[in-house]
Image: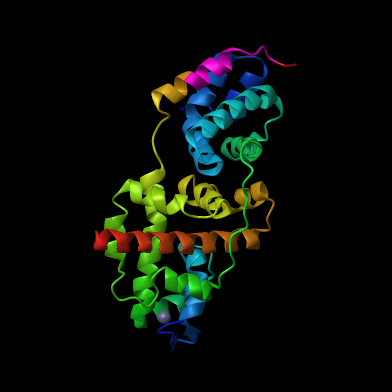
Amino acid sequence: MSVSDRELLQRSASGDRAAFDAFVERHGADVFRYARWVAGDETDAEDVLQQTFLDAWNAAGDARAENGARAWLVSIARRNALRVSSRRGAAREQSLEELGELAGFGDPEHTPERVARAAEQRGLVEDALAALEPEEREILVLRDVEELPGASVAELLGLSLAAQKSRLHRARLRLAAQLRRHCGLEQQA
Amino acid sequence: MRGEREIGGLRCSQVLAQLSEYFDGELGDLERGRLEAHVRECDHCARFGGVFAAAVRALHTKLRASALAPAVRERLRARLELPPRRT
Ligand SMILES: [Zn+2]
């Protein structure tokens, strides 16, 4: 059985580099992926990645690892990402019905099979995600890519559980709408 | 909404509003039953539910990569070597 995050962090806190290396190895890719989508470009994302683990090393002793080390790391990464990027435009408010129509509600041509086929191309999914507002992108990465639980994400983003759910739902609809646009472009090409 | 109808006491827009909670397993038995009853009879919602689920699934399956690129990992290691521990 592998060593728990909590134990790795405890050992790191007492100066065990090998334990911290194992911790970095375990979570580095997740932190980088989050940083890449939130910070916007690869260079900023690497900076966030490095700073996050430096901070984690320094704070290993007070890690709130009982709530999950990944959520703790993401909260550090988020602070660092906010520092490097001065974005945070508020998403344009559209009604759920409008979003639903943009995402293809009532369009007989737009089928699950068509979406699944388009989504075979990783680049197309990345483009769709990149086209969203930062706030929408962030919650999708946290909930649907990293699969952090709703309660952790709500806490991380400083939202009520209900507000977190609502933001997630709208973001998913906007992603579905972007994918539909890309399906259309693909067809015309 | 285009093609909006009411089936089983639920309108399509109400189904749309609950899709995330449905797929996340957060609806109570009663609400879930009503939603499923609507979707069984409504081709718009059946198709759109599938479209929505396929979009969300794509995020996880396509973007959850396995590991850090070697160059990124090396630069991270190099940066973590340097500082003395703050106490
Ligand atoms: Zn319907």
Q: Is residue B44 above or below residue A118?
A: below
- The dominant secondary structure in magenta is helix
The quarter of the image that holds ligand 1 is bottom left
Query: Residue furthest toward the front?
Result: A189
Camera-side residue of B82 and A94: A94
State the residue at coordinates (31%, 60%): A185
Q: Residue at x 33, y 46 (%)?
A: A122
Residue, far right: B87
Where is residue B64 shown, x and y percent of the image? 41, 42
Q: Is residue A85 above or below residue B55?
A: above
In this view, A21 is above or below A165: above
* Residue B55 among magenta residues: no
Q: Looking at the rendering, in which quadrant would you find the C terminus of chain A?
A: bottom left
Number of disc labels? 0
The answer to whether residue A111 is visible is yes
- Indicate the position of residue A72 as horizontal and vertical percent values: 63, 37
Residue A7 can be seen, yes or no? no
Which residue occupies the foreground of this view, A13 or B86? B86
Q: Residue at x 57, y 20 (%)?
A: A20
Tell me where residue A174 appears, x and y as whole percent.
48, 62
- Against A159, residue B64 (above or below) is above
Q: Residue at x 65, y 59 (%)?
A: A161
Q: Nearer the viewer, residue A70 or A4?
A: A70
Q: Which residues are magenta?
A: B75-85
